[in-house]
Amino acid sequence: QVQLVESGGGLVQAGGSVRLSCAASGRTFSIYPMAWFRQAPGKERDIVATINRNGGSPYYSDSVKGRFTISRDNDKNTVYLQMDSLKPGDTAVYYCAADSRGWGGVFLSSYNYWGHGTQVTVSS
């Protein structure tokens, strides 16, 4: 079993920055591809960023590319999402996800462990 706990969300003004953290339980965290998804009110849950087990090959959705940075610290069993130049359109619940099967990728179905989410609200 893997448990994921997100933190770091809150209210921020447009143009500001927030760093989300996702702490994972389990000794095998270092072999899991990880991802951040987000879900705005009334919308589907969409991919934001992914990272492979070694911290390389990051992927970003077009809407956040150049503004968000995903990273991980396997010694701390934690994955991060640094969010800069925030826009009101970034307002959503942000979810951390892990894939214990090693597939990774951009699809919801690829991930079998999820956190409960953390709210990020960007005011204009």
Image (spheres, rainbow, N blue to C red):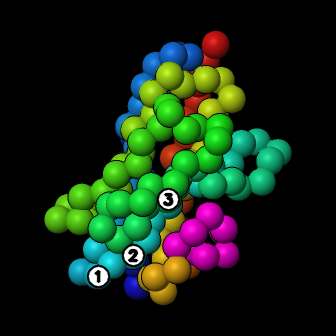
**Quarter holding the N terminus?**
bottom left
Does residue 27 appear anywhere in the picture? Answer: yes
* Percent of width and height locating residue 106: 62, 64
Magenta span includes 105: yes
Q: How many marks?
A: 3
Q: Residue at x 30, y 68 (%)?
A: 54
| Left or right of residue 87, residue 96 in this image | left
For the residues labelled 1 and 3, the Cα–Cα distance comes to 18 Å
**Quarter holding the C terminus?**
top right
Magenta residues, as a range?
104-111
Crowding at dot 3, Cα within 10 Å, few <14 / some 14-19 / many 20+, comes out as: many
Q: Which residue is mark 3?
A: 50
Crowding at dot 1, Cα within 10 Å, few <14 / some 14-19 / many 20+, comes out as: few
Q: Are marks 2 and 1 in contact (CB under 8 Å)?
A: yes
* Percent of width and height locating residue 51: 43, 61
Q: Which residue is mark 1?
A: 28
Q: Quick one: which residue is furthest to the top in this view? A: 124
* Percent of width and height locating residue 118: 51, 46
Q: Residue at x 40, y 67 (%)?
A: 52
Q: Are marks 1 and 3 in contact (CB under 8 Å)?
A: no
| Left or right of residue 30, residue 116 in this image | right
For the residues labelled 2 and 1, the Cα–Cα distance comes to 7 Å
Secondary structure at numbered mark 3: strand
Give the number of the mark in front: 1 or 3.
3
Q: Which residue is mark 2?
A: 32
Seen in the picture, residue 40 relative to 87 is either above or below; the reply is below
Q: Quick one: which residue is furthest to the right in this view? A: 42
Q: Which amino acid type is shown beneath numbered disc 1?
A: Thr
Disc nearer the start of the sequence (1/3): 1
Seen in the picture, residue 90 relative to 20 is either above or below; the reply is above
